[in-house]
Image (spheres, rainbow, N blue to C red):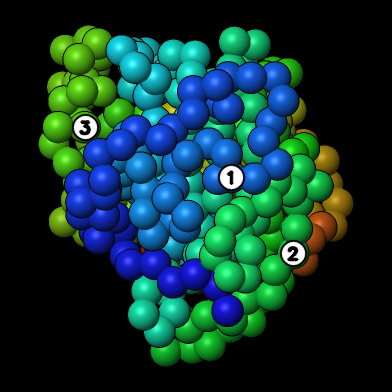
Amino acid sequence: MRIILPFLASFAAAVSTTASTDAVSDIAITQATNPARLSEFGFFSGSPLKPSPRLMPYELRTPLFTDYAIKQRFIYLPPDGQVTADQAGKLSFPVGTALVKSFGYQGANGLDVIETRLLLRKAQGWVALPYVWRADGSDADLRVGGSRVPVTFTHQGMTQSISYGVPNKNQCKQCHSAGNDIMPIGPIWQNMHFPDSKDAAKLALSIAPDVKKRAAFPNWEDPKSANLDARARAYLKVNCGHCHAPAGSASNSGLFLDGSASSAASYGIRKRPVAAGRASVGLDFIIAPGKPDESILIARMESTDPGIAMPEVGRSTVHTEGAALLRDWIAAMPPTSY
């Protein structure tokens, strides 16, 4: 049995009530050799139940789907470190920053943690590292080759058993890529929410006022946050846009879901796949307006076949609710208007 954690709302309280001693090791973050054990960083006091007070918890308005895993996200900034943002709201962090994300599933008393992934900003660039927690919750060990962990969880009253995949270092790079470099993909100012307003204020100090005034991302599953079109596009941007971008690993597809598409076709609407094959599942268009059942996008989202499923990494189940959102979105497109 693995360590049991509270929900994210309790994490902010855990941070505020943890002893004020700053145990985070800046040397462990920036040195060339990566620690074999997560405890060497000092991000947690013995278990993820006790995050360091130097970690800033945050949430995403529209998060990336990973087999229904619950995620706990933190930012560690070095002393006097400042954050900036480009005009798209993507944050830029100083050397010595650590982005910390734990993954787990709801257990009888809280979150049953499986792994903690790190993005470390070293002098030479970002480094992605996965750490798998031991069964007794005493520590987590570096697994650069990835790992498979059997997981059983309940979602909407249905029990599912999966082989949860901890990504290897190359799989991390597949999504977190900018050319040959690793980069963060989650921290976009308009998609972030901080339980502690002091953390938000600290990060906002060096962000341009016009960037901070930009509209927040909608919550894809909340109809009150935006209309169907905006929520569907936010879902695609967060879940697919890091690869389907001009500098992403899927740039050769000509399908751009990161917000850079300059035409309906480059967004997938009435766009034919660049290469016909099994992955096209016998359909003609990425998005067939008004016809979700004839859209390759939906077919690949609803498949778990490794040669067909999209995204390729990070899921072995179908995100039923996300697929339903995009089905509704495509069904609402007038077939003759594109």
Three-letter amino acid code at the position of disc 2? Arg
- Residue, disc 3: 199
Give the SS element for disc 3.
helix
Q: Quadrant of the N terminus?
A: bottom right
- Report, in whole angstroms, how far the alpha carbon at label 1 lies from the one at label 3: 24 Å
Comes first in the chain, label 1 or label 2: 1
Three-letter amino acid code at the position of disc 3? Asp
The numbered disc on residue 208 is none
Task: Please state if 336 lies on the left or on the right of 201 as rendered.
Answer: right
* Observer-nearest of 129 and 284: 129
Comes first in the chain, label 1 or label 3: 1
The numbered disc on residue 38 is 1
* Observer-nearest of 185 and 128: 128
- Residue 28 spot, x, y in % from top left: 58, 27
The numbered disc on residue 148 is 2
Three-letter amino acid code at the position of disc 1? Leu
The crowd level at tag 2 (other Cα within 10 Å; few <14, some 14-19, many 20+) is few
* Observer-nearest of 22 and 327: 22
- Report, in whole angstroms, how far the alpha carbon at label 3 lies from the one at label 2: 35 Å
Give the number of the mark in front: 1 or 3: 1
- Residue 331 spot, x, y in % from top left: 43, 61
Give the number of the mark in front: 1 or 2: 1
* Observer-nearest of 245 and 211: 211
